[in-house]
Image (cartoon, rainbow, N blue to C red):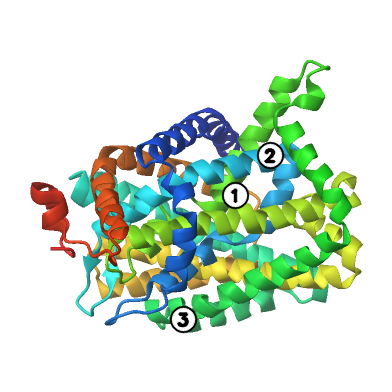
Amino acid sequence: MEQKILVWLDLANSVLWGYVLIFLLIAAGVFFSIRFGFAQIRYLLHMVKILGESGEKNGKAISSFQAFAISTASRVGTGNLAGVATAITVGGPGAIFWMWVMAILGASSSLVENILGQLYKQKTKIGTYVGGPAYYIEKGMKSRSLGVVFAVLLIASFGFAFNSVQSNTIAGAIEGSFKISPFYVGIALFALTSLIVFGGDKRVAKVSQYLVPIMAMLYIFTVLFVLSKNLPLIPGIFKLIIGSALGIKSIVGGIAGTVIKEALTMGIKRGLFSNEAGMGSTPNAGASAEVSHPVKQGFIQTMGVFVDTLIICSCTAFLILISGSVNSGLKGIQLTQAALAEQVGDWGYTFITLCVFLFAFSSILGNHFYAEMNVRFLSKNNKIAVFVYRMAMVFTVFIGAITAMQTVWDFADFFMGLMAIINIIALFALHKKALLVFKDYVAQYKHGKNPVFKSKETLGKEEDGIDCWK
């Protein structure tokens, strides 16, 4: 029975990721890029500027930068280390090119979903905000049932499946480097996660605010050190990535189409898993921020797509391709470890283990935040339901550390794919409102103002369901 389920799951994921999502994600990225005038490129410097100004907050809600840190905590995980290595070994170096392309196109989808997340957010009794796709599906599309389906899929994938994988990755890395039993690692993760998540959203935001920049800078500076030692090789790496992506080296052999399809599929699949653009996850964090205009958080979350894929994933890709380990037969995190160790010595294994812990643990916190938002949606902010979810989640973190997780990835990919389909449908249905809000922001910004959103002035009769901005 179990074998039949795995075969069915493999077939479903092949269709879902090999055909349906490739079409939908590319179509959405191209459509929203054109509709919003390639805002993700034109306003890139502006994104950097407002990110630097996003640390201030008013009231009890979390700051815009804290929301960015939470979403980045979820984005930047083992996918940036192990996922990129898998993309290269399965799809070839060309997969990195398609990750870049999808990050640039997908950033437009991220902009739309995060504007909508802010637009339809709701204020709680204690002064914080909740929101995300489940909320804008219910309020904007007038479909509570579809919102419930999305919320259940997100809780199953982010709250449980992904967090099991993250804790399992941490336990495996620590056992390999320090010979510590996964059972004890699981106990430690259970205690540490409980300490943070039972402290509420503010504590998750506080930890993410400091943990994310530290872990990102540590990794980026280490890889930049390696690249500085190998500057003459970098032009050749670019040529290899682009040539492999376009099948240039395979045209003579007549297999260019197969090479391009494998690179394209892996680039999109691992790129989406890493940067989450259009999936419907980051709006759960983006909606929780206190901002003067929804587009501000939309821009900040869009910046997160570039940080994740164009910077951190690229660091891993260049590290692997510069080293001789790419042809070693190693896969996943072992390939990344070997690539760094070849350049800096054996301490590279220990350093990658530290990075795995920081990246994966921060992902546990970010994933938990997303899932709790949707538990609140399903239970209408019932405190008992939230408490039960938190208990189940931290227990899952422990179980994940001590259990083989070979099939969890397949389930997670399946749930994630269904989530993305539902969310993209919602984005197409509601993008006109997001476009009106975006144009309002641009008009104020061009007149030298600090944009402030007033729903009645911008949306008129279309403001139905938009409670926080009235």
Disc 2: CA contacts within 10 A as few (<14), some (14-19) or many (>=20): many
Kindly state the secondary structure of the residue where label 1 is placed.
helix
The residue under label 2 is: 95
Q: How many marks?
A: 3
Asked if labels 1 and 3 touch by Cβ distance under 8 angstroms, the answer is: no
* Other residues around mark 1 within 10 Å, as few (<14) / some (14–19) / many (≥20): some
Is residue 350 depicted above or below 75 in this figure?
A: below
Q: CA distance from mark 3 to mark 1?
A: 29 Å
Residue bearing the label numbered 3: 206
Residue 306 in the image: x percent, y percent? 55, 54
Task: State which tag comes first along the sequence, 3 or 1.
Answer: 3
Q: Which mark is nearer the camera, 3 or 1?
A: 3
Is any part of residue 188 visible from this angle?
yes
What residue lies at 88% left-to-right and 51% top-to-bottom? 232
Quarter of the picture containing the N terminus is top right
Tell me the tag on residue 409. 1
The answer to which of 468 and 122 lies nearer the viewer is 468
Residues packed near mark 3 inside 10 Å, few (<14), some (14 to 19) or many (20 plus):
some
Q: Describe residue 300's horizontal placement relative to residue 102 as left or right.
A: left
Frontmost residue, 360 versus 136: 136
Separation of marks 2 and 1 at Cα, in angstroms: 20 Å
Residue 330: assigned label: none
**N-term mark: 3 or 2:** 2
The three-letter code of the residue at mark 2 reads Ala
Q: Is residue 209 above or below residue 80?
A: below
The residue closer to the viewer here, 164 or 74, is 74
Between disc 2 and disc 1, the foreground one is 2
* Residue at x-position 68% and y-position 39%: 95
Give the residue drawn at x 43%, y 82%.
203
State yes or no: discs 3 and 2 in contact (Cβ < 8 Å).
no
Query: What is the quadrant of the C terminus in the image?
Result: bottom left
Observer-nearest of 293 and 216 = 293
